[in-house]
Image (cartoon, rainbow, N blue to C red):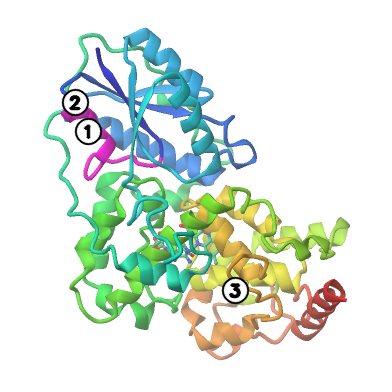
Amino acid sequence: SPVIVWLRQDLRLRDQPALRAACESGAPVIPVYVLDDDTPGRHAMGGASRWWLHHSLDALAKDLAAKGSRLILRRGRSAPALAALAEETGADTVYAIDHAEPWWRAAQAEVARALSLDLHPGNYLAPFGSVRTGGGTPFKIYTPFWRALQQQMPPHRPALAPRHVPAPAHWPQSETLFDWKLLPTRPDWAGGMRREWTPGEEGAQERLEDFADRAARYEQQRNLPSVEGTSMLSPHLHFGEISPAQVWHAVAGKGGTVGTFLGEIGWRDYAANVILQFPDYGTCNARKDFDKLTWRGGKAAEADLKAWQQGRTGYPIVDAGMRQLWATGWMHNRVRMIAASFLIKHLLIDWRRGEEWFWDTLVDADYASNAVNWQWTAGTGVDSNMFVRIMAPLGQSDKFDAAGYIREWVPELAQLSDTEIHDPTFPVKGYPERLIDHRAARERALAAYASLKS
Ligand code: FAD
């Protein structure tokens, strides 16, 4: 009887241990993707991710066809959908890569009760739970986590794609991608994404090759939003179109500051390690005292939230970032930190509203990385207490030389000089006044924090 390969955020053929193990079992292989909007609840895939998913599945289906196979598409809750497919095809074994999201772990447990589930590590540098303190407990803080993780490095040599994926005598029925309506129609907001990205395994390989030559200069350039200094691999890594082991082996040995880059790949493992310990990290403050903080609400706060989402706060670096996000589904990391800090501290809006917006608009929206970075910025996380460290958006913009970046994304300011563009003198034609003055915002945030402590 055939075996099933259950694909989720691991949409690749190369270095795909679940697919490989299925092929090596000697049985015919049925690769399936189940679109499951039920099990994740509030974290069902957002709009930008759905756009990406459509193209990634399209690419994967073609790659599988070239190996003599097919991609079967089903919709519904994962476990019953797989059980139904197993029943139709006579399969009783499901091969899959292990995932950290709480809903995937719940689905995995459910699948394992009905069928034989063969789980493999492969989407992170190290298998879940393998990086531990001397006392055998999981880490809460990044730095010691990374030190311990490095003891296990380098990761395995990436495996090639299977030469051939054995096909069953009869293919089960498949839904069609277009019926899933994952793409926007009216309005079609995906033009900027089509220009920026090539979802799928080939696109991931191209990004990696392009970055490998720049990897040695990573540390010097990564904080400069006007320069393409980072890898832009995040959506490819999130959807598993490339494995972190492939990334590691392509850049390790490039010299320069490539170690700093590998440390960022380590952040991704760290974030997964955090949500494995705290599955509700995306919705609950890790520091419970923050539950008492009075975030702003009501009409004025909603209007401010909207201005932030639309890139109309009157702070050029924040607005540039938010517009880049809307247009391309991605934002430079330094600017993500500035924009997130601005929402939380300057506007005193609950970080979860920001997490939610990023979840919907990022092509790399990742439950673990998003939650860990939002809680880190808010100071509500297990790893930091930084609420009182309030980033000055105007100073950050100047320090990281964001003039070119602002010119690209906020054309209303394009005429201003390199010095004035960070901190324009108002009024500026077509550009909104600041939502709030930096000093006043700072005092309001510190007062809210002080009332929490008293
Ligand atoms: P590079 O600098 O080239 O780094 C290489 C890879 O390392 C990235 O592709 C990513 O997989 C990983 N990485 C880098 N920085 C981080 C980090 N701080 N935390 C976890 N992994 C990291 N990243 C996501 O992948 N998904 C998210 O939903 C997400 N939400 C974020 C929200 C906020 C508020 C902030 C401040 C950061 C968030 N990040 C998120 C982290 C980071 O901004 C992106 O991973 C990075 O900008 C992606 O660009 P890159 O691929 O060029 O990164």
Q: Amino acid at mark 1?
A: Ala
Q: Does label 3 point to a residue whose CB lies under 8 Å from ligand 1?
A: no
Up the image or down, 286 lies above or below 115; here it is below
Q: Point out residue 256 in the picture as x, y percentages from the top left corner.
A: 24, 82
| Residue sticking out furthest to the left | 163
Picture quarter with the N terminus: top left
| Residue sticking out furthest to the bottom | 419
Q: Point out residue 29 in the picture as x, y percentages from the top left corner.
A: 24, 22
Residue located beneath label 3 in the image: 338
Up the image or down, 74 lies above or below 205; here it is above
Res. 381 image quadrant: bottom right
Give the numbered dot on residue 21. 1
Instruction: Choose mark 3 or mark 1, whichever is in front.
Output: 1
Res. 265 image quadrant: bottom left
Give the numbered dot on residue 25. 2
The stretch in magenta equals: 9-25
Instruction: Choose mark 2 or mark 3, whichever is in front.
Output: 2
> Distance from label 3 to label 1 (Cα)?
44 Å
